[in-house]
Image: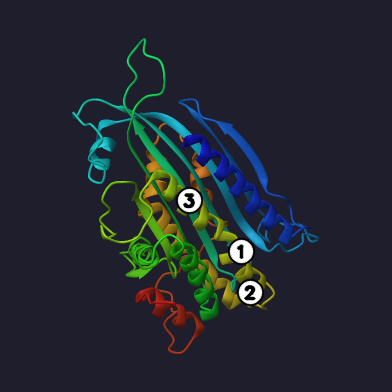
Amino acid sequence: MREQVEEYIFGLQERIVSEFEGLDPNAPQFKRDSWLRTQGGKGVSCVFSAPPAIFASSNTQETILEKAGVNISIVHGMLPPAAIKEMRADHSTIPYDGQSSLPFFAAGISLVVHPRNPHSPTVHANYRYFEITEKVAEGEEGPAKVVAWWFGGGSDLTPSYLYEEDAAHFHNTLKGACDKHGDELYPAFKKWCDEYFYIPHRSETRGIGGLFFDDLSTEKHARLSEDSKRPRTAEDIFAFIRTVGDAFLPSYIPILKRTNPLPSTEQHRRWQLLRRGRYVEFNLVYDRGTKFGLKTPSARIESILMSLPETARWEYMTDMGTDEGSEETKIMEVLKKPREWI
């Protein structure tokens, strides 16, 4: 399974980066940064960054994207006892004695796209595979026994301004991908997404949701009924991952193409930057992936913080988003009370 996942995510990364480069052929290309991890592993970070206007020359052309990253990480090493204890809550097959570490393998693709136009939404997606094995005794040959494995991932949309047709398109595309593998998947993972991307200290969600799931394996899943039709083998779950991964471009690119030409004002930009501030708050305070990455020894900090926008804004007691009937208030109503889009 390791080799299959690796082959798929590298292919998906290239398709996604090529699509964005094709949308804006006059913009700088994504920087492709291949790296090796001393403790074991490798990856490729593909990052787009255009300088803010204050740093740009007078002849700098406006780009569709302001900042974006499509990253692959394939790492292995030893999982400490504290992490093993936490993971056993969903994977009882993992041995735990409170003292021993276990070998792990993790592979995934993670992307975040922050467009320049305030009418174009930020988008995030992540698909990953995690595996834990027994230790190989000294002198033994052959692969170690796998004691636990699972898939996780999802995709979600974070607009500054609400266009209901775009929200419906995004969710419909993801639902269509999920429905090929079981009717229960989309509603369960959509609800999980609304719960996960919630900012408690703001009492609002980060965006308008999408999919979020974790711990998909042959084991019983707390979010899915036992008698439901759903992928249960490693091969079937990986097929589901490929389907939802392949749905990323058709779920988002039409939205970006539609909204990029829309005119915007300084007020639109101000609100976009305020909403990006909320994005930063969630990612640094609550996001499990960011927190896990920052705690990992010799982690690539630049790749982890790739998800943060180029520019964000905070205002003390801002009045934006409070005027009844305004476009800013329209999105806030949805963020305060998530809704169904289909």
Of pointers 3 and 1, the one earlier in the residue sequence: 1
Say which residue appears at 46% left-offset and 78% top-offset: 331
Q: Nearer the viewer, mark 1 or mark 2?
A: 2
Which of the two discs, 1 and 2, labels the residue nearer the N terminus? 1
Residue at figure coordinates x 25%, y 31% from the top left: 81
- Residue tagged by mark 1? 115
In this picture, residue 183 sits left or right of residue 311: left
Q: Is residue 27 visible?
A: yes
Q: Residue at x 59, y 43 (%)?
A: 10
Residue type at numbered disc 1? Pro
Q: Please give the name of the residue rendered at 55% of the width and 68% of the height, measured from the top-left corner.
A: 121
* Residue where numbered disc 2 is placed: 259
Task: Note whether 107 is above or below 138 in the view shown.
Answer: below
Q: Position of residue 216 (x, y in %)?
A: 35, 50
Residues at circles 1 and 2 in contact by the CB criterion of under 8 Å? yes
Q: Secondary structure at mark 2?
A: helix
User: Marks 3 and 1: CB-CB under 8 Å?
Assistant: no
Estimate the spatial distance between the alpha carbons at disc 3 and disc 2, rounded to whole Å: 32 Å
Q: How many marks?
A: 3
Give me the disc on residue 239: 3
Q: Residue furthest left?
A: 97
